[in-house]
Image (cartoon, grey):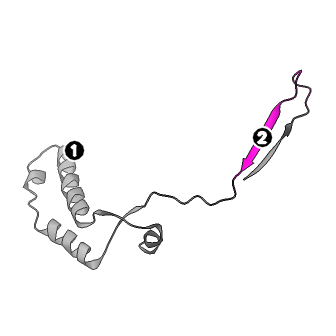
């Protein structure tokens, strides 16, 4: 770590303002492992299978378009989350899974 400090010469105040600059040269490694979704052929096939075999009656029975859309969205979102769950991976593996 390097430290620089000093006084600022200015006529704005009746005293000299002080400053300090701390510089850390070491690399900080992140302890947080990213979460990714794996879009493999197997997972894609499972997603399609879930949507294909889903009963859509709860979407079609509503005359209010907002309620119908919310039901539709919930079905698709649930199938998505089941088929492509979030997996915790290392930083190196996360970069290769994009």
- Is 97 in front, or is 49? 97
Where is the C terminus found, in terms of image quarters? bottom left
Picture coordinates of residue 45, whole percent (x, y) = 21, 75
Q: CA distance from mark 1 to mark 2?
A: 57 Å
Picture coordinates of residue 46, whole percent (x, y) = 19, 72
Q: Residue at the location (45% across, 57% down)?
A: 32
The disc, 1 or 2, on the residue closer to the chain's N-terminal end is 2
Which residue is under mark 2?
A: 20
- Is 54 in front, or is 28? 28
Q: Residue at the location (65% across, 59% down)?
A: 26
Residue 17 is a magenta residue = yes
| 31 sits to left or right of 88 | right
| Secondary structure of residue under mark 2 | strand
Q: Is residue 41 above or below residue 51?
A: below
Which residue is under mark 1?
A: 66
Magenta part, dominant SS: loop
- Is 73 in front, or is 17? 17
What is the span of residues highlighted in magenta in the rendered image?
10-24
Q: Residue at the location (72% across, 53% down)?
A: 1
Picture coordinates of residue 25, whole percent (x, y) = 69, 58
Residue 67 is a magenta residue = no
Q: Residue furthest front?
A: 1
Picture coordinates of residue 89, whole percent (x, y) = 39, 67
Q: Is residue 8 above or below residue 66?
A: above
Q: Residue furthest top?
A: 14
């Amino acid at each position: 770590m390097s430290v620089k400090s000093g006084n600022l010469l200015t006529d704005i105040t009746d005293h000299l303002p002080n400053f300090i600059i701390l510089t850390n040269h070491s690399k900080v490694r992140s302890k947080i492992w990213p979460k990714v979704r794996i879009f493999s052929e197997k997972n894609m096939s499972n997603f399609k299978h879930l949507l294909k075999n889903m009963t859509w009656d709860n979407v079609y029975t509503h005359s209010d378009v907002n309620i119908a859309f919310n039901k539709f969205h919930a079905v698709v979102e649930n199938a998505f989350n089941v088929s492509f769950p979030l997996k915790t991976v290392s930083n190196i593996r996360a970069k290769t899974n994009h």
